[in-house]
Amino acid sequence: MTYFKNVESLEELRKQYKELLKRFHPDNPNGSTEATQSINAEYESLFNILKNRHENRATTDSEDKASYNNMKYDYTEDIRLREVIQNIITLDNINIEIVGCWIWVDGDTYAHKDILKGLGFRWAREKKKWYFHTEAFRKRSHKSLSMDDIRNLYGSTEVKTDEKKRLKMA
């Protein structure tokens, strides 16, 4: 089954990937592990195709080289975010939320603070949450936004952890 439709850029692929995971995650009534694995396999395939297409276009067209070097989307950021999520998804009693290119974690995080620190998470005292972002992001404003403002500005996706997997691993 083909899950992704009319994907022309890495940004579109990433957006559809988040939506598909929300809909087909094993915790949802219509979801299953097989569907999630198929989505991940198709994502990897399309990701490599789009990345190669973009790199080939940028390296063959001399006018595009400058824009390629200054492009805002870096596929290594996507890989790093996925690695971090895979490392924390099995932690007990936490909530994981992706907001824009940031990962926010709250819940019963005290028991996992060393793991979170080791992965590069930082504590946001005002929001009472841990956050992670890649080095590609630099905050330019000193303006403080609430979590609701941040969600409205960048979009938000909650990552549901699989309780059954955690019980099998224990």
Image (cartoon, rainbow, N blue to C red):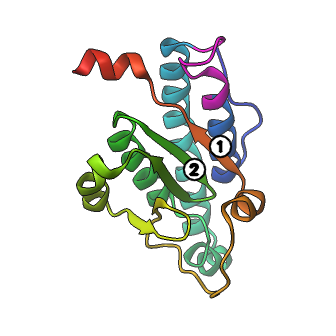
Other residues around mark 1 within 10 Å, as few (<14) / some (14–19) / many (≥20):
some
Q: Secondary structure at mark 2?
A: strand
Residue position marked by numbered label 1 in the rendering: 13
Q: Is residue 53 visible?
A: no
Q: Residue at x 75, y 64 (%)?
A: 149
The three-letter code of the residue at mark 2 reads Ile
Q: Residue at x 50, y 61 (%)?
A: 128
Q: Secondary structure at mark 1?
A: helix
Q: Position of residue 73 (x, y in %)?
A: 59, 64
Picture quarter containing residue 120? bottom left
The answer to which of 114 and 48 lies nearer the viewer is 114
The answer to which of 121 and 11 lies nearer the viewer is 121
Magenta-drawn segment: 21-31
Q: Position of residue 153 (x, y in %)?
A: 76, 63
Q: Is residue 156 visible?
A: yes
Picture quarter containing residue 132? bottom left
Sequence-earlier tag: 1 or 2: 1
